[in-house]
């Protein structure tokens, strides 16, 4: 396993997910939203978030989209390609787009601009983590779990070259000293 140290443990994450669900629940125009997670990193966060929403009486419909970047795995290159779209009818539905982390902002802005064209009644974005220091496209998420500095994070769905997704906490990779 890659060397790492914990930033947010399971208890802290669970409490924050509940707070986010309450904030989202308060703003939702109706209790049958569509939630779309961006694969693969958001799968655990979305799983916990929709269950937190369900405890508050919300009945989300769940789907995923897959987008990919050209270029090396730990560097965002300029282009975002939609690999898997959602087939759901979003017309007139409240829509929540959920991602693991907002980094350059390219992914979320491409997905948001694309889905807004499908005429949802309400569209908000929610990310577990935000790295504002890395932003290239000017976008902020409507709901943010935690802000993180410019470090590579793994766990709770996030990976480094395929490793670390199943860790139950969010951790920062230790920098390699050569
Ligand atoms: P953006 O398009 O640059 O905002 O990139 C967002 C995507 O890059 C996220 O959905 C993640 O998949 C990935 N990503 C960015 N930073 C990290 C990180 O620190 N750990 C794991 N994945 C990351
Ligand atoms: Mg991602």
Image (spheres, grey):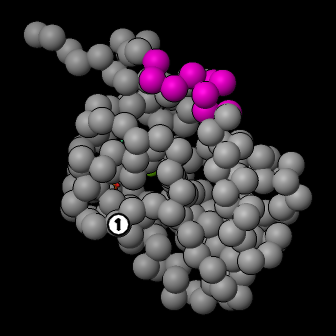
**Element class at badge 1:** loop
Residue bearing the label numbered 1: 139
Q: Quadrant of the N terminus?
A: top left
From the viewer's perspective, is 59 left or right of 80?
Answer: right
Q: Residues within 10 Å of mark 1 (few under 14, many from 20)?
A: some
**Res 45 visible:** yes
Q: Position of residue 163 (x, y in %)?
A: 45, 26
For this orientation, the residue located farthest to the left is 178
Q: Position of residue 121 (x, y in %)?
A: 66, 85
Residue drawn where x is 30% and y is 41% of the image: 73
Residue drawn where x is 39% and y is 71% of the image: 110
Q: What's the magenta region? A: 6-14
Q: Quadrant of residue 43?
A: top right
Q: Is residue 169 above or below residue 47?
A: above
Residue drawn where x is 53% and y is 79% of the image: 115
Q: Position of residue 18 (x, y in %)?
A: 71, 43
């Amino acid at each position: 396993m890659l060397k790492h140290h914990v930033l947010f443990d399971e208890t802290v994450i669970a409490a924050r997910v509940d707070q986010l669900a309450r904030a989202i629940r308060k703003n939702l125009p109706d209790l049958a939203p569509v939630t779309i997670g961006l694969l693969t990193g958001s799968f655990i966060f979305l799983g916990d978030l929709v269950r937190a929403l369900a405890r508050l009486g919300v009945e989300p419909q769940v789907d995923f989209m897959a987008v990919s970047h050209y270029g090396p795995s730990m560097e965002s290159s300029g282009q975002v390609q939609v690999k898997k779209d959602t087939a759901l009818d979003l017309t007139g539905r409240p829509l929540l787009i959920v991602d693991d982390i907002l980094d350059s902002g390219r992914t979320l802005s491409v997905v948001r601009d694309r889905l807004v064209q499908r005429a949802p009644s309400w569209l908000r974005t929610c990310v577990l983590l935000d790295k504002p220091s890395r932003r290239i496209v000017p976008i902020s998420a409507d709901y943010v779990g935690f802000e993180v500095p410019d470090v590579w994070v793994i766990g709770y769905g996030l990976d480094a070259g395929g490793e670390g997704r199943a860790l139950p906490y969010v951790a920062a990779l230790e920098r390699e000293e050569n």
